[in-house]
Amino acid sequence: MMYRRVFNYPWRFRSMFEEIERMRQMMDRWLGETEGILPMTRAGVFPLVNVTENKDNFFIRAELPGVEKEDLDIQATTNSVSISGERKIPAEDEGARYHRREREAGKFSRVITLGADIQPDKVEANLKNGVLTVTVPKAEIAKPKQISIK
């Protein structure tokens, strides 16, 4: 009984978690208020990207609905590919009221770091039906070599 009075057991632990929850709610409110002021606080993941590989190439497939090839910029270095561009959404009528607005327009950029050296001068890209496919050939040194046993 004396232990409960001195150390406020078990309420001490409960109040600690309540304080953490209160701090989390305060942060959520604060971040919600700054969303319009600081649009960069969101960590967007557009475009959605899948990266696969085979023995000779990496394949990067990105979903880019509504993006024209003229609005894309693809750059390659020795071990990464950068995809950047701008998604444009036609403006609505002046008197239009939104019931839901989930599609956003704006500039985007993704850098995909690959697990091996590549040949940047031989990278090819194709945009079809809103899906960008980038074929990235591996450098000769990065390709697996068959070792014969003597």
Image (spheres, rainbow, N blue to C red):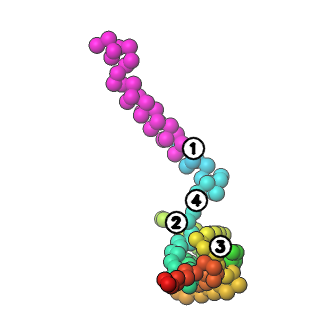
| Labels 3 and 2: the sequence-earlier one | 3
Q: Quadrant of the N terminus?
A: top left
Label 4: few (<14), some (14–19) or many (≥20) C-alpha neighbours in 10 Å: few
Residue 19 is covered by the magenta coloring: yes
| Labels 3 and 4: the sequence-earlier one | 4
Residue 99's place in the image compared with 91, above or below, is: above
Residue 85's place in the image compared with 19, above or below, is: below
Label 2: few (<14), some (14–19) or many (≥20) C-alpha neighbours in 10 Å: few
- Secondary element at image label 4: loop
Q: As shown in the figure, which amino acid type bears the numbered disc 4?
A: Ala
* Residue span colored magenta: 1-28
- As drawn, the label of residue 30 is 1
- Secondary element at image label 3: loop
Residue projecting furthest to the front: 150
Nearer the observer, disc 1 or disc 4? 4
User: Which residue, given by chain and number where applicable, does mark 4 sit on?
Assistant: 43
**Is residue 3 or residue 98 the one in the foreground?**
3
Q: As shown in the figure, which amino acid type bears the numbered disc 2?
A: Arg
**Is residue 74 or residue 63 the one in the foreground?**
74
